Image (tube, rainbow, N blue to C red):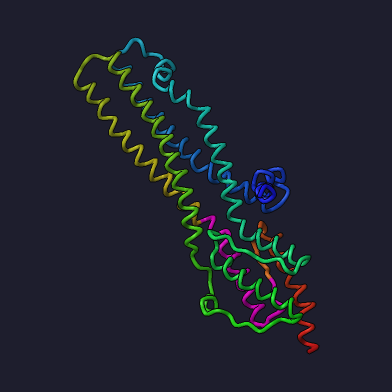
Amino acid sequence: MMEGMLAKFLRSPIPEIKRVFKTEDSRFIVSVGLKVSAISFFINLFIYYFLFQIMRLNFYFFRAHGSPELLDQSLFFDSIIGEAVDNLPLLFAYHIFLFFIGTYVGWLILHPFRRIGEYCENVLENPNTIYKVEEFSTYKLLTRFSEFFFEFLRESRKKGVIVTHSIPPQFSKIHKPVADKIFMLHFGLLMVIIGISSAVFITENSSSVFTSMVELATKTLSNDKTVNRYFSDQMYVLDDVVVMTIMLIAGSYILLGIHLYAKVSGAAFGIFSTMRAFMKGNYNSRVHLVGYAYIRDYTRKLNKYLDYIQNNLAKSESKD
């Protein structure tokens, strides 16, 4: 059990950080981490800039009403954004955490391809190696068919010749990438968690700024109904900021999910098509993906295994 846990850890994204920028797959993993954290970070900057402009207008309002304590702009901002400034270290720590969450997402995205590559590498040495599909693995089309395909090759190696096998109906009529509900569910749940935490963080800071400003107005300005109403009604602006934050975060992470899925869906279909063509008798079929450098190492291992099958089993079949 301990050996299994150690092996899982060694395959986790943490050790791979040491290989950052040395391989295409590690670059992909880092880029996903940057994208996940950058979305929240830049939305934070946008919201804070928006709030800053509102604070500037309020400063001019204070000055126009002759508040002698707050004629200095720096003093005014120090009075209302103190708590938000105190939260800056937490803000940066949160986005560093998001970066590592993003690298884990990148690692998960490549995991099914990595498993195929590792299996093809291991099965050349040990023909009895069994390809196991994880229960909640993504890219259902690829993982389910690869399980069927590798079992077909394993049986062929046992008999010393490529056996005849029909393609199951659920796989024979697929001619383009299909939506992967498992991937969408896993990624969607993760993005919901990230989105909610980001929205809560931004909302808390925005609320502290508005609350400080209203308290400052109550203390320094005359107890005028118009003034009080002016600042009280700005809480509705805060509600709009919250809604805008949620919409920006939700929309941005949905687009990120579509973008990341597009980065691998074509590759998954290409590998599936190659396996299916090989089973149909096209033993020269190999995976040749353009624009998927981060998957190239895994497809090379698959191609190497197919070369072995063709050179050893297909020739035996022709001799018979």
Residue found farthest to the left: 225
Decide: is 286 above or below 11: below
- Is 117 left or right of 318, judged from the image as shown? left
Decide: is 129 above or below 318: above
In the picture, which quadrant includes the C terminus? bottom right
Q: How many numbered badges does the structure rendering display? A: 0
- Is 95 left or right of 119, judged from the image as shown? left
Decide: is 212 above or below 142: above
- Corner quadrant of residue 213: top left
- Is 241 left or right of 179, judged from the image as shown? left
| Between 172 and 249, the one nearer to me in the picture | 172
How far across and down, in percent of the image, does residue 62 sit?
Answer: 32, 18
| Between 103 and 126, the one nearer to me in the picture | 126
How far across and down, in percent of the image, does residue 209 sit?
Answer: 38, 26
| Between 28 and 137, the one nearer to me in the picture | 137
Decide: is 20 above or below 159: above
Residue 66 falls inside the magenta stretch: no
Residue 266 falls inside the magenta stretch: yes
- Is 107 left or right of 71, judged from the image as shown? right
Span shown in magenta:
259-286
Residue drawn at (22%, 25%), measured in percent from left and top?
229
How far across and down, in percent of the image, does residue 17 sit?
Answer: 68, 43
Residue drawn at (33%, 33%), measured in percent from left and top?
238
Residue drawn at (54%, 55%), measured in percent from left and top?
260
- Corner quadrant of residue 159: bottom right
- Which secondary structure dominates the residues rendered in magenta? helix
- Corner quadrant of residue 212: top left
| Residue 274 seen | no
